[in-house]
Image (spheres, rainbow, N blue to C red):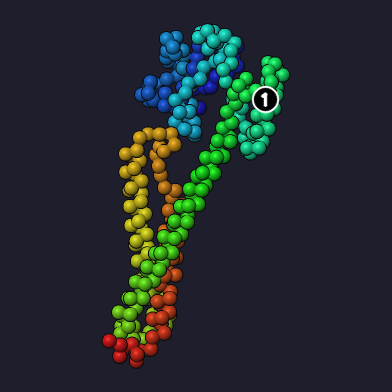
Amino acid sequence: MIDGRFLNQKDITDYRKVVVLGRLVYEALFKEKEAVNEYIKVGGVPFKVVGVFDDPGQDRDLQRIYLPVSTAQRVFNMGNDIRTVCLNLEETSVAQSKDVERDVRKEMAVKHKFDPEDIRALGIFNSIQNYKQFMDLFAGIRFFIWIIGTGTIIAGIVGVSNIMMIVVKERTKEIGVRKALGATPWTIVSLILQESILITAFAGYIGLVLGVGLLELMGNLMPAHDYFANPEININIAVSATLLLIFSGAIAGYVPARKAATVKPVVALRDE
């Protein structure tokens, strides 16, 4: 609850004309003004606002208003008919939800005298099953993206390694002079590694900035939708990816660095 209170049993018992608003409904109707104890019309009937709520779910959950079911039955001539019954199951597998679905169908069949095998008598929508199918689909997409990302990193390692091999070849005389002046093999290795890491770190940072910019641009251009609203990058994944690129740069530069460290000064100084 952001403001006020939620519905209680006395609201239902006394048939009170009170409502609780979702945050988006509140913002649309009251423009951030005080809403509690004010009145709105629902189907032409005035109802008193007693609370405003937020919801971590989707936007459509914030576009709802709640009122006492007893009041709705009287005011809108709904009688005692129940159109929908929702069962909320926490940490439930698809198999367990199927068992619950079967039990509910049997109980309702006994109560209302219909064949439990007759699916036309009672319609049941199992959202857990659909949710699992969606999660499996997104898991497959994530796995595919990981394969593409891994292949891209490997290709990048090969590319950077080739670049560093060329750099080492072009700087053979420089390396020979350094070794002639007393540079140790580790000094040569660290020189090549630093350059390799700098190239990948700089490229990774530029890629990260461009990716964030592209995502922000797509977020502004895409139509507002519950599933695609406000796309964002997980900062932990972004930092991890950048560190992985830096590590990959070190790997890419190690082989050329080792080759440069083994160059003999006399051979390097004679190199054309």
Q: Residue furthest left?
A: 272
Q: Position of residue 101 (x, y in %)?
A: 65, 29
Q: Is residue 39 left or right of residue 79?
A: left
Query: Which picture quadrant has residue 31?
Result: top left
Q: Residue at x 44, y 25 (%)?
A: 63
State the SS at label 1: loop
Q: Residue at x 53, y 12 (%)?
A: 72
Considering only vertical position in the picture, is 203 above or below 194?
A: above
Q: Position of residue 185 (x, y in %)?
A: 42, 83
Q: What kind of residue is marked 1?
A: Glu
Along the line of sight, which residue is nearer the eye, 90 or 157?
157
Along the line of sight, which residue is nearer the eye, 182 or 140?
140
Residue 15 visible in the current orientation: no
Q: Position of residue 61 (x, y in %)?
A: 48, 28
Query: Which picture quadrant has residue 242?
Result: bottom left
Q: Residue at x 34, y 42 (%)?
A: 218
Residue 134 visible in the current orientation: yes
Considering only vertical position in the picture, is 194 above or below 134?
A: below
Considering only vertical position in the picture, is 117 above or below 167?
A: above
Return the residue at label 1: 117
Q: Residue at x 56, y 15 (%)?
A: 69
Q: How many marks are shown on the rendered structure?
A: 1
Q: Is residue 212 left or right of residue 88?
A: left
For disc 1, the neighbor class at 10 Å (few under 14, some 14 to 19, many from 20) is few
